[in-house]
Image (spheres, rainbow, N blue to C red):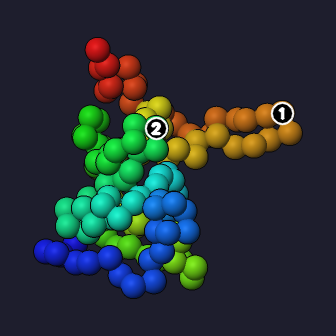
Amino acid sequence: MSDKPGIPEGLDFDKGDGLVPAIAQDVHTGEVLMVAYMNRESFQETLTRGEAVYYSRSRGKLWRKGEESGHVQKVHSIYVDCDGDCILLKVEQIGGAACHTGYRSCFYRQVTPEGLKVVGTRVFDPQQVYKKS
């Protein structure tokens, strides 16, 4: 993105106790890939690196997208909503999948009268990518 950009005025991390939702959208197709959270530190690192860095609520620390899988998100542009409490990242998804379950998008299930229906195609086997010890 750039050398040392700052957090823009109008982006309000205080509304959500230091976190704002961040939507990752494919820069070429417009497909919504995932939703995560950012704090000031992850947002600043995203600006500096030019790759998506989120805050993992479950781990309680920064999560550099692709640090285990290699499926990084190169950030092309960043938008902030009218209330200043949500971020939209337009990204290039490297490695084919944004979802840790192996699907391109985390939104691979559709609500139907019969229940959830898988409408996405699995791109990778998570057992092979995330070799947890």
Real-space CA distance between mark 1 and mark 2, rounded to the nearest whole angstrom: 31 Å
Q: Which mark is residue 5?
A: none
Please provide percent x and percent y for residue 81. Answer: 53, 77
Q: Which mark is residue 58?
A: 2
- Indicate the amino acid at tag 2: Ser
Please provide percent x and percent y for residue 47. Answer: 26, 69
The C terminus lies in which quarter of the figure? top left
- Indicate the amino acid at tag 1: Glu
Query: Between residues 65 and 42, which one lies in front from this camera angle?
Result: 42
Q: Is residue 60 above or below residue 124?
A: below
Q: Which mark is residue 114?
A: 1
Residue 8 appears in the rendering: yes
User: Label 2 neighbourhood size at 10 Å, few (<14), some (14-19), many (20+)?
Assistant: few
Q: Which residue is rendered at x = 40% and y = 67% of the image? A: 90
User: Label 1 neighbourhood size at 10 Å, few (<14), some (14-19), many (20+)?
Assistant: few
Q: Which residue is rendered at x = 40% and y = 37% of the image? A: 59
Query: Between residues 18 and 63, which one lies in front from this camera angle?
Result: 18
Query: Outermost residue toward the right?
Result: 113
Q: Is residue 96 above or below residue 133?
A: below
Quarter holding residue 41:
bottom left
